[in-house]
Amino acid sequence: MKPIGKDYVKKKYDQVVPGGIDEWPVVSLSNNRDAFIKEVTAESIKRIKKLTPKRSSLIEEIETTLFREKLRVKRNPWAVDPPDEADFLQSIKDRLLEISTNDDKEDIDETLEDILSEIIERYASEIAGNFKKSRYRMARSIVTFGFARLLNASRARGFWSIFSTRYSLQDKIHITGEVEELRTLAKKGTIIMVPTHFSNLDSILIGWVISALGLPAFIYGAGLNLFNIKIFAYFMESLGAYKVDRRKKNLLYLETLKSYSSLAIQKGCHSLFFPGGTRSRSGQIEKRLKLGLLSTAIEAQRVNYQKGKRDGLHKIFIVPVTLNYNFVLEAPSLIREYLRLKGQERYYVENDEYSTSYKISAFLLKFFTKGSDISVSIGRGLDVLGNYVDTDGNSYDKSGRQIDTQEYFTKDGKIISHDQQREDEYTRMLSDRIVEEFHRINKVFASHLVAFVAFEMLQKKFNKLDLYNFLRIPEEDQIIPYEEFKAVFQTVLRRVHEMYNKGEVSVSPYLTGDPDKIIAHGLANVGMYHAKRPLIKNKKGDIYTQDLNLLFYYHNRLVGYNLEKYV
Amino acid sequence: MSKECVGVIGSGSFGTAVANILSKNSKVLLYARNAETVEKIKSTRISNGQHLHENITVTNSLEEVAKKCNVIFPVVPSANFRDMMRQFAPFLHPYHVLIHGTKGLDLILPHEMPTDFKMDRSCIRTMSEVIREESVVVRVGCMAGPNLAKELALGHPAATVIASPFNEVINEGKRLLRSEKFQVYGNQDLKGVELCGVLKNIIAIASGIISGLGFGDNAKGLLISRGLVEMIYLGKALGGEISSFIGLAGIGDLVATASSQTSRNYTIGFKLAQGKSMDEAIAEMEETAEGVNTIKIIKQLADAQGIKPLITDTLYKILYEGMKPQDGLSYLMKYPGNIDIDFL
């Protein structure tokens, strides 16, 4: 039996940018915030006009926006919304009315231009982050210090342990994978980190990881709903967040958002997208990514090349990251939502489930005092077409030949052209590559594996039932005899190790050695702090579930590896 | 006439025909694998029985093709396609555009066959997938449609479909191929169009058998329509869109191939019906009939997946298990008729 060891290194990393915080692109962005908003506004207007070449189509687009916005204000208002929103919309409406009675074409165009830039500027200033270096420093130390205190208090016993420094966040959050490569690439070019998204905690977690690795702050889009809470808003803004409002799905807003992201990347700001767009409801690794923000990475790369910025400093690197948990606090509500949505497709209001500071604090407290360890796997860097890069930022094809990424944007190797349809297709290809990398770097935990095996075994036994009926089978049918379970578990485990050896997946160090111990470890950790446990042993030593929905959720983590065949 | 140079890989009858069409608009660099063939073509200016247009230069160097041409048309049999791509790949760049004209499949089986091995879609590659796998080229397309090489060589009017997810590839294809005798359409469903070309070869063999047995147009009409239904089912299962099958590359190509004696696949079927064995029939052919291999691959796949494509299944028995063509036909005729159309 191999000993169970650590697979992460606990170490203190130097700052990547030696000049300190003043050298960070994100700082210069926020120092020139007003100028940047102007730039974003101009760029967005240019895009929207290109998309609506005729006057009538532009008017239609503005009218649609107005209609949807009024509906949103009425039906789904949030605390964070500015109070003058209704008045603003009314003024737009009045002016649109004026246009419809006006015959002077020049006059109309002028008014339209005004309306457009007012709306866009409003959006742009809402989106724009407000990074303050002093606040960043403070937020960082609060997070690190505060959480470390909580951690030590909960792990060790006794009053004085609150001052202990035995445990740091790095014991809680294991950072594994291509850490050094990421740090090197961050010096060479612009990083776009694309993590999987399972929990609301991810934003803070990844923010901490970035700072712990000595990287400059990344800008990232955070749901506007999180800004409803003042204290949360404070931390998010300090950590470099800009705001994304998922309620606004109109063209004007979406183009402003894309311009913001694209221009920030062009200015060398490291960025972070959750490419799934939202937390994975099913617990599965994202299969289909949101292409909107992702396309800005490709666009920014092309623009940089067009401006003749060929050196490493302006190359854009995509770094996939997976966050691996034994326990996701929101799992019960996420899976319920998933089942409801899949069961009957229907529109639902983007709700704001973390609406009170109390809920948030309770969540964090529970997580840091109780939640089990988390591991963060950093993947290899890719260029915007999904080719691996080396530490110098050079791209390589599958057979190890160096290639020039710029050539993807040319027809003859020389002249760079802008072809939107081509870039849309590249975005799809990049998205496929990221999903592929997610599966490769995803770390299999014992807890995922026990959940997967148990759920598949049960489902196989009731293969005549569809998912919904299956999830309602009576409790006495939800028991699996231990020996039977162990036999199947070992078969699947063998397969996982095979895949690991081929580099198709990553595994936790707990996944070696005595199978009984692995199973015990998995059972002890899978969704450990839910009121109803997804998987547990009964008195006879057999395995059963207290909540089949939750078991389904944790099982889903390993969907997509074709492991069902081995059950 | 533009100065740019377009590449064609493969000097078979279709490759040569494509080169001749391209030569109307641009300079063409035609690659032949065999150095002797190259010399022969150079001295005679005849490739595969077709006179070469003066704009065509012949070469034996893949490197030269990659260096001089940005758009390249690989037209080599599917059996050699992957090897060709492996030799070609080191010279290719991300700016190259490849539009292939090969109507076959590539089969990949694991090196160590697990005992419980089950063949599935992941074991099969279309030619565009081979290109993507073996090279850095991403802007890939295919050319498919009723393009019987012998008729193209005579300059008869014809049309083709260029399929690619990239509009720029479709536009390049149109620009380079279009002439007064040759019409070019575009389609974004690359997989579907490739599969049309691949699957129609199966039906073409069946059509040859029917003619060889001396049956007439009623039988052919029956075969073509039922054959199309089978193509659509298989094509959809393999990732194509139904709509492509009712286009030029689907029904257009099917009608042409299934009624043409100049088609290789048709000819194979015809010879079989006349009582020749598979080996004899193949030995008499000058060039590869892709359908023979396609039937084998599709049959294996269908078996593994537990589905039964009736025509392909019967053809497999005739080709590989010694069933008499006459018996195969009566088996098909006895099979209880189903609903005419149930996929739209």
Image (cartoon, coloured by chain):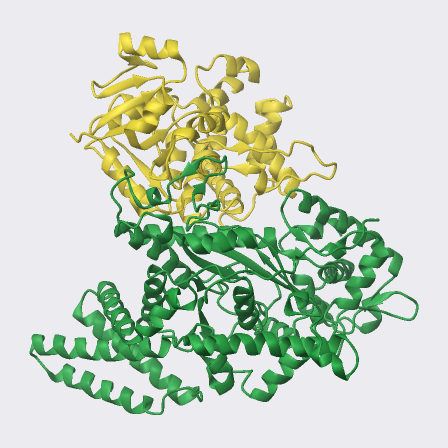
Identify the image quadrant of residue B286: top left
Q: Position of residue B277 (x, y in %)?
A: 57, 15
**Above or below for A539 versus B20:** below
Residue A105, x across and y down, in percent: 8, 75
Question: From this viewpoint, is residue B316 visible?
Answer: yes
Q: Which residue is nearer to you in this view: A378 or B164?
A: A378
The green-tinted chain is A
User: Residue placed at 33% from the left, 39% from the top?
Assistant: B95
Vertical relation: A546 (above or below) B128: below
A147 to A179, vertically: above or below: below
- Left or right, A80 with respect to A320, comes to left
Based on the displayed image, in which of its 4 quarters is residue A324 positioned?
Answer: bottom right
Camera-side residue of A466 and A355: A355
Q: Which chain is yellow?
A: B
Residue drawn where x is 36% and y is 92% of the image = A83
Who is closer to the viewer here, A549 or B199? Answer: A549
> In the rendered image, is residue A229 in sight?
no
